[in-house]
Image: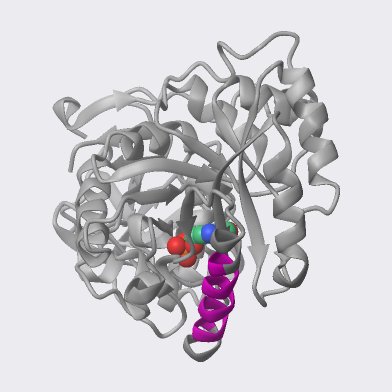
Amino acid sequence: MRRRDVLKLATLAPMAGLASPPTAAAQARPAVRLRPGGSDDGFDPWVEVIASAFRHNAGEVSRLAGGRPILAVVKNNAYGLGDQVVGPIVDGCPQVSGLASVRPAEALAMRAAGVRKPMLTMAELGEEESAELVRKDVTLSCWLDNAGERLARIAKRAKRRVPVHLYLDTGMNREGMPIARALPWMEGLARQRDVRLDGVYQMFVHDIDFDRVQLERFAGFLDRASAAGLRLGMRHAAATFELHRLPETHLDAVRVGNALFGSPPGPGVTHAFDARPVFRLKARVVRVERVEPGESAGFNRGFMPTAPTSVALLPVGHTDGYASAAAGTCEVLIGGRTYPVVSGGVNSAHTIVDVGADPAVRVGDVATLIGPDHPSILPAEVGARTKTGTLQVMTRLSALLPRRVVEA
Ligand SMILES: *Cc1c(COP(=O)(O)O)cnc(C)c1O
């Protein structure tokens, strides 16, 4: 890698600057989640996070949403890429008005990494960690029947009025206050002086016909709540699937993750825009050796060439998140050419590649195993060939791999 391609090494001090003593949530977080990137002549594999791809995707999402603000979903450790790395990039996109995560540690880590925009946690959380979030200017969600009492105790602990979005269930039956009981519940919360109702939302099931039913239920509720004189705040509902398929759901903001991360809206649904992959998995070649017919490479003699060839070794494997099923199905990009991963060639920490009889590949060359740089290594292609799916190719990347933010 050329040094000037590396804008920033992910040498973030984990958990630095958090309230002390740390909460249980903070303590549960491993001390080192994102390791500093290896040295430029080392052989540790790494993940590149592509800043311009996020900005491009955010611009396209905004266009599809008719210029409405984006509530950027960065849950699940930013879909596997690292919330402390992705958070600041997304925070810097002008179309993004706020960030949404699920677990308290994610929101705290992103605040510690410098994320400034409004943040929302999309779950019911413990009261102690909720109070800590409120002190860090993170908006909570609630859906439990006793949310009023819980929020009152949280407000007391935080010594602040608690900003909250109400999460309603319009038929997914996963999370949220069932809409049939929601109006008196919301009226009760609206009367509480220690609570500030800043928003109301719901989640679609991503079935176009039932999504329409859910939208009708949600809109009906919002009408009744307005008629009752309740302040609704920001109304948001659409995730990536509805961003594409149901513009009438866009309301005040779209709440999308996959679209920003370049992953498809759903099984069999493709993006309505040029969604760019936002990461690469890379490693340096650590060995190139000839293999003669009759010899083999790897466990169980998995690869037995019938003509002389050479194998290159990449010190990256399935524990790093590169699927075992890539062996015999996927290719890697080295020096502008693609080479096949040999049968049986993906082990826990090693990948063996057939680089041909007269190899152009040298020790120290950088290999890209997944990324936007060639059609055969696109996340969608690797996902299809390994039967893991585009999203899992990203979410399964080990959190221990160093992250490097690159511009392009
Ligand atoms: C994950 C999630 C989203 C984002 O969904 P995408 O398909 O990634 O856009 C939105 N809202 C809620 C409540 C979620 O859990």
User: Coloring scheme of the render?
Assistant: one colour
**26 is within the stretch colored magenta:** no
Q: Looking at the image, how many numbered discs can be counted on the residues?
A: 0
Instruction: Name the spot of residue 231 as percent of width and height, x first.
Output: 54, 48
Horizontally, is 62 left or right of 165 in the view? left
Instruction: Name the spot of residue 300 as percent of width and height, x first.
Output: 61, 68
**220 is within the stretch colored magenta:** yes
**Residue nearest the viewer, comparing 19 with 224:** 224
**Is residue 369 shown above or below 354?**
above
**Residue found 71% across the figure and 62% down from its top:** 183
Instruction: Name the spot of residue 64 as percent of width and height, x first.
Output: 24, 67
- Where on the picture, by quarter, is residue 169? bottom right
Q: Is residue 233 visible?
A: yes
**Residue found 41% across the figure and 40% down from its top:** 98
**Residue nearest the viewer, comparing 108 with 327:** 108
**Principal SS element in the magenta part?**
helix
**Residue found 80% across the figure and 25% down from its top:** 24
Q: Quadrant of the C terminus?
A: top left
Instruction: Name the spot of residue 209 as percent of width and height, x first.
Output: 50, 91
Q: Give the residues drawn in magenta, as a range.
A: 211-223
**Residue nearest the viewer, comparing 75 with 192:** 192
Q: Is residue 40 visible?
A: no
